[in-house]
Image: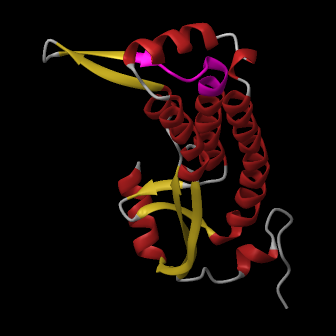
Amino acid sequence: MKILANNLTLLDWLPESQEVYVYIVYYRIPSEDGFCFVERTVDRELKLRYKVIPSKIRNRIKALRFRFYNILKEHGTVKTEIGRIVKAEDLGALKAKLYSWLKEWKHVEQLINDFINNPVNFNDWPAIRKTIHELGIPWNELVSKLKNIPLKLRIEFIGPLKLPRSLYEELLEKAT
């Protein structure tokens, strides 16, 4: 009969598994700059960007995008050559955090709908109205662009994948 030392746990005495279960996190998050501005080329070289979406919406998308990457980092997601991977045991906490993040994303969708239905309620509206008028952007084209923003959001988990521990450690080493 073996007696465990005070500072060791039962897990320390068990043999280490030769496999690691991971999930690949596949995602697509809209970039605020791709939706909030239109570009026009002047003199074949100079590109000018014009804001066509209120700052309130743009800033919210930007903040959520940065928060998304922080959530991935907090929960041990590592960007490797096969994609962003997360250990299977960390997946539950990651999904829970992303679920609450998605609830905040719904607020962006509501802001977009509010802007489409009542743009005068936004502080940026006079400048945006002037810009779309000067550039000749039809309102229905802008509305279509706005309605596509929530459709661009996509998060998937592929797995579980069983990787040999040596490959997993090699992927982590290359990632750093």
Q: Residue 132: say if magenta.
A: no
Q: Quadrant of the N terminus?
A: bottom right
Q: Nearer the viewer, residue 168 or 153?
A: 153
Percent position of residue 21, x then y: 58, 77
The residue depicted at 75 percent of the width and 44 percent of the height is 106
Residue 93's place in the image compared with 38, above or below, is below
Image position, residue 170 (x, y; %): 38, 65
Residue at the image position 39 percent from the left and 65 percent from the top: 82
Magenta segment includes 56: yes
Q: Quadrant of residue 81?
A: bottom left
* 11 or 34: nearer the viewer: 34
Image height check: is 85 above or below 30?
A: below
Q: Position of residue 96 (x, y in %)?
A: 78, 57
Q: Is residue 51 found left or right of 39 in the rendered image?
A: right
Which is nearer the eye, 168 or 47?
47
> Which residue, as the protein is rendered here, is positioned at the far left?
44
Give the magenta part as a residue range.
50-59
The spot of residue 92 in percent (x, y) is 75, 65
97 vs 144, left or right, is: right
